[in-house]
Amino acid sequence: MEILLVGAGLSGAVTARGLAEAGHRARIVESRDHVAGNCHTERDPETGVMVHVYGPHIFHTDDTGVWDYVTRFARFRPYKNRVKATTRGEVFSLPVNLHTINQFYRKTLRPDEARAFIEEQADTSITDPQSFEEQALRFVGPDLYEAFFKGYTLKQWGLHPRELPASILKRLPVRFSYDDNYFAHAHQGMPEEGYTALVEKILDHPGISVELNTRFSRDMGAGADHVFYSGPLDGYFDYQLGHLGYRTLDFERFTYQGDWQGCAVMNYGEEDVPFTRITEHKHFAPWEEHAGSVLYREYSRACAPGDIPYYPIRQLREKALLADYVALAERTSGVTFLGRLGTYRYLDMDVTIREALNVVEMFNTRGADAMPAFAVPPL
């Protein structure tokens, strides 16, 4: 079969590879001048540092099948994401852990003492937290909320935490140990040669062709037996119902001779600091040595037409519009929408890969005519 795939990010690449290995011909069209989507990496010509062009990506998963898949195509080096935060004139470890608590409150609490102490700070009158703010106040109390979560959230989402669902904060752990590894997954690492080299290896198959700098139009699918679309869901329909809401990022690049901040990620939790964080990219490859350093200040704002969409907002307005687009997609034959943009969901890389692998299995089992618009429902 002739299969058209839109987008050469992880969703498109993994799907194309699976289809090609099953004997299909996979043609990928990609609007950018490179593969790997937002996890694209490239060497900075000035310093030699491997730069995560669209912001940092750290691979972490409990899915051993996905780990086996990516390590089939690239050597992964061990990497632990240890985030720091500057607030109130001091530097703390994130996620909030026993060291953070003891440093912040000038105490020397043991784990059980710290657990009891934080419960004393918490607002126990909140029994069923509905908003991010309520969850934080019930979870860690007003002091830690103000220092680490409130300002950062206002900048990141452009909304007050009382306007965001409690589920966002439920993904942020508090640890009553000195473990400062941001993730707790069994498999964590970085591809030694970067994510773009990984994706290029996935795409290295005689049954796959890739056309860069090529914008998709719906008439391209006319000669294909099926289309897998990983671009923006609303974009497929030329935004005829309106634009789904996203946050985007602006990056302010600067360089330094030496080590600027001593870590890969430094968050800035205070509202009066306009950027959310500074990333120093040579620390994402600690096995390399570079005299120079490349850093980026990140600024979050509302995504306008023509911007790169990063984070789906998924508030009530967006969910209502999403439901309309889902209904439109389900009336469209011959197309399966997948990935972060195609399903309007925030997805980690491992989940993106797992869903692509599952889509391939579904296609190879059912055939093109029985493929749904969404293998994973967006709503």
Image (cartoon, helix red, strand yellow):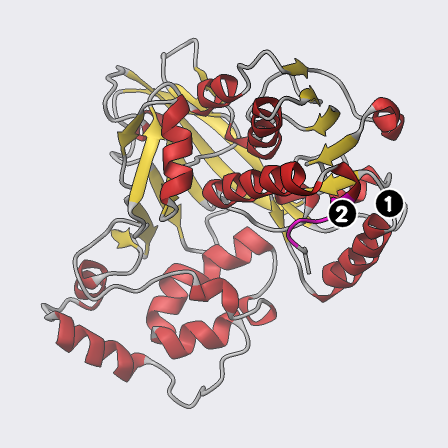
> Which residue is depicted at the point 20% across and 68% down?
105
Residue 343 drawn at (x, y percent): 68, 48
Helix, strand or loop under label 2: loop
- Give the camera-side residue of 76 and 103: 76
> Which residue does the numbered mark 1 point to in the structure image?
332
- What kind of residue is marked 1? Thr
Label drawn at residue 301: none
Label 2 or label 1, whichever comes before in sequence order: 1
As for residue 272 lying within the magenta part, the answer is no
Q: What's the magenta region?
A: 370-376
Q: Is residue 370 left or right of residue 344?
A: right
The number of numbered discs placed on residues in the rendered structure image is: 2
Question: Relative to 188, is 327 above or below?
Answer: below
7 to 130, vertically: above or below: above
Q: Which residue lies under the disc numbered 2?
A: 373
Residue 52 falls left or right of residue 347? left
